[in-house]
Image (cartoon, grey):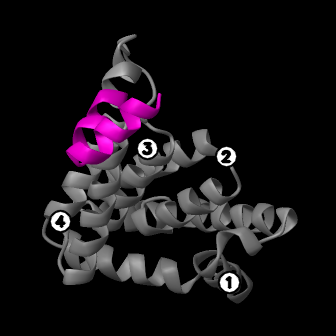
Amino acid sequence: MDNMTNIDIVLNDPRTKGDLSARVSSLALASIPQETQGLLLRMFADPYILEKDERAGLVAQLRDCVTQYPEVSELRVLLGMALCVNLDAQAAIEELRESVRLAPNSFIAQLKLGELWMHLRVVDKAEEHTRLAALLSQSLAQSELARRQAASLRTMKREGIERGGYKSPFGAVTHVFRRLWARPRSEASVSLDIR
């Protein structure tokens, strides 16, 4: 048997799964080349500063890492994020879905898949993954990230910013009446008198 088969057998052994997968995950993340790490840091600081060729290079380098360690969920999350920055939403969805499949209890995998669905305005899927991320959070910082994402999703839903599904033709009228109703009475009556 080759080494990859031996690693797969050991990783899938329920007696050692947690400990060894953590070590393999750390090894995989440590194997990311310095150049790629630098691009990742720049991407995390501001995704808009990466040039087109740098984004493409980052995606290619992360694909190589994923090819080398296909079972490491965190690498797929990084690749999915890089694909988002490179505006390749379909490939990002596939990588983040695979990341969630590999590690369904991963806070970051659930959060990032929820974030991608949120940006694509698929609110129901975004809410589902964001809720799971909130349940998986293990620190105040993680809880805060999930809470903010959930708040953004509630705002999107309230304002009717979502893709797909049936939209009532009365939605726009209802939205106007809600806004008028939410104003103080004196302000609402003044705005109605002006028109």
Residues under numbered marks 2 and 3 in contact, where contact means CB atoms less than 8 Å apart: no
* Residue receiving disc 4: 136
Q: Residue at x 43, y 36 (%)?
A: 161
Q: Secondary structure at mark 1?
A: loop
* Residue receiving disc 2: 88
Q: CA distance from mark 2 to mark 3?
A: 13 Å
Image height check: is 97 above or below 31? above
Q: Earlier in the sequence, mark 1 or mark 2?
A: 1
Amino acid type, residue under disc 3 in the picture: Trp
Amino acid type, residue under disc 2 in the picture: Asp
Q: CA distance from mark 4 to mark 1?
A: 30 Å
Amino acid type, residue under disc 4 in the picture: Leu
Q: Specify the principal SS of the magenta part.
A: helix
Q: Position of residue 166 (x, y in %)?
A: 36, 13
Q: Residue at x 51, y 50 (%)?
A: 95
Residue count near mark 1 (Cα–Cα under 10 Å), binned few <14, some 14–19, many ≥20? few
Q: Is residue 194 left or right of residue 57?
A: left
Q: Is residue 40 left or right of residue 141?
A: right
Q: Is residue 180 left or right of residue 72?
A: left
Q: What range is drawn magenta here?
A: 176-195
Quarter assignment of residue 84: bottom right
* Residue receiving disc 1: 33
